[in-house]
Image (cartoon, rainbow, N blue to C red):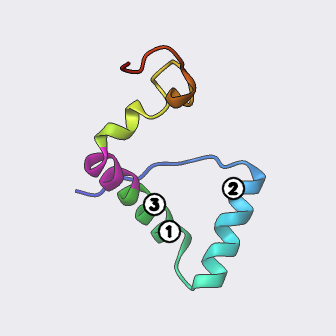
């Protein structure tokens, strides 16, 4: 069964989509489908990315002093 949705785009995104469609010869709806499929696949392949940037602490751990072995 097929489903359809309506999406409202801001001017910049709508312009990009139109230009990309003209440049590649791929329909706008196919570009949207491809990007949705890519987002779904990327999430399944790299679930650890949800943690990116979540750790707190020194940005460069080597700059911390006093923790080395003597």
Q: Is residue 42 magenta?
A: yes
Given the current orientation, which residue lies at the most extreme left position?
1
Foreground: 24 or 63?
A: 63
Residue position marked by numbered label 2 in the rendering: 13
Are there few (<14), some (14-19), or many (20+) residues within 10 Å of tag 2? few
* Dot 2 or dot 3, earlier in sequence: 2
Given the current orientation, which residue lies at the most extreme right position?
11
Residue position marked by numbered label 3 in the rendering: 35
Q: Residue at x 50, y 27 (%)?
A: 61
x, y percent for residue 62: 51, 30
Tell me how far mark 3 sits from mark 1, CA to CA. Answer: 6 Å
* Dot 1 or dot 2, earlier in sequence: 2
Residue 53: mark: none
Residue 31: mark: 1
Secondary element at image label 1: helix
The chief SS type of the magenta part is helix
Relative to residue 63, is residue 55 drawn left or right?
left
Q: Is residue 56 magenta?
A: no
Relative to residue 45, is residue 64 drawn left or right?
right
Tell me how far mark 1 sits from mark 2, CA to CA. Answer: 12 Å
Secondary element at image label 3: helix
Secondary element at image label 2: helix
Where is residue 50, by image quadrant? top left
Q: Residue at x 30, y 55 (%)?
A: 41
x, y percent for residue 65: 53, 18
Given the current orientation, which residue lies at the most extreme top position?
66
Q: Residue at x 55, y 31 (%)?
A: 60
Are there few (<14), some (14-19), or many (20+) residues within 10 Å of tag 1? some
Q: Are marks 3 and 1 in contact (CB under 8 Å)?
A: yes
Which residues lie in the magenta part?
A: 39-46
Quarter of the image with the N terminus in it: bottom left
Relative to residue 59, is residue 36 drawn left or right?
left
């Amino acid at each position: 069964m097929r489903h359809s949705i309506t999406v409202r785009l801001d001017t910049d995104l709508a312009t990009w989509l139109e230009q990309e469609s003209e440049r590649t010869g791929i329909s706008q709806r196919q570009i949207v489908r491809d990007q949705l499929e890519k987002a779904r696949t990327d999430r399944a392949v790299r679930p650890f990315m949800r943690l990116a940037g979540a750790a707190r602490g020194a940005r460069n751990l080597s700059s911390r002093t006093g923790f080395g072995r003597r």
